[in-house]
Image (spheres, rainbow, N blue to C red):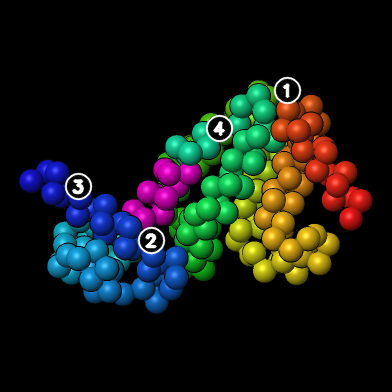
Amino acid sequence: MARDTAVTRQKLLGAARQEFAALGVAGARVDRIAELAGVNKERVYGHFGSKDGLFAATVGAAMDELTEAVGTPGDDVAQWVGSVYDFHRERPELLRLLLWEALHHPEPDVVGEQDRAAGYSLKVDALAERLGLAPGPEAAVTLLSLIGLAAWPSAVPQLSRLIVGSHVAEGELGSVVRDCVVQLAGRMAGGGSASERAGSGHETAVADR
């Protein structure tokens, strides 16, 4: 029974991610989510209480996947930023959920705010240690900037295409943006990362085009 309950919950979260990422909280329909998951509509309310509760759980599950995939900034900050970039490029649903969240839940009413803030605090501390900074505003804003650098190209891919597309060969947009993002992150982190050095050859190739 417990296993069936867990399976049903995961099916609902998977269906909800598709629905919420595409349509947001206001546009999503519980009956359609239940149909996608192959379960009765009442199971949604039994597991999550409400559509807002389901949205909160969906965002939480997606955030957990990101944390599990990329961890916290380590010795190679640029490599970490590259991992964040890769995650969002391969799984853009989380960014769409966060953009919908910003529209549906105005500050400070953010889903799971305390737990999420605590998770980011761990990343700020790790980054501060790596950069030799005291944990505080400078390290926090640096983390915010690095996340933006990694995430924004996937959040609004049309901007990547409009701004960068005409400057790179066809089919190379994603890899060029990634290389440049990693290099910029390396510079922000002090310019000494292995990832930045590995990308320097590509930077020269881009400049020669």
**Where is mark 3, residue-wise?**
6
**Residue at 13%, 49% in the rendered image:** 4
C-alpha separation, residue under disc 1 versus residue under disc 4: 16 Å
First reached walking from the N terminus: tag 3 or tag 1 = 3
Q: In this picture, which residue range is highlighted in magenta?
A: 57-66
The reply to whether residue 136 is in sight is no
Locate residue 7, reporting x and y percent: 20, 50
C-alpha separation, residue under disc 2 versus residue under disc 4: 24 Å
* Neighbourhood count class around disc 3 (C-alpha, 10 Å): few under 14, some 14–19, many 20 upward: few
Q: Are marks 1 and 4 in contact (CB under 8 Å)?
A: no
* Neighbourhood count class around disc 2 (C-alpha, 10 Å): few under 14, some 14–19, many 20 upward: many
**Where is mark 1, residue-wise?**
132
**Exactly how many numbered labels are in the figure?**
4
Q: Are marks 3 and 2 in contact (CB under 8 Å)?
A: no
Does dot 2 land on a helix, a strand or a loop? helix
Q: Is residue 123 above or below residue 204?
A: above
Q: Is residue 80 above or below residue 162?
A: above
C-alpha separation, residue under disc 3 versus residue under disc 1: 43 Å
**Residue at 90%, 50% in the rendered image:** 207
**Where is mark 2, residue-wise?**
17
Front label number (1 vs 4): 4
Q: Amino acid at mark 1?
A: Gly
Q: Residue furthest front?
A: 170
**Where is mark 4, residue-wise?**
72
> Which quadrant, please, contains the C terminus?
bottom right
Q: Is residue 62 left or right of residue 4?
A: right
Locate residue 192, reporting x and y percent: 79, 27
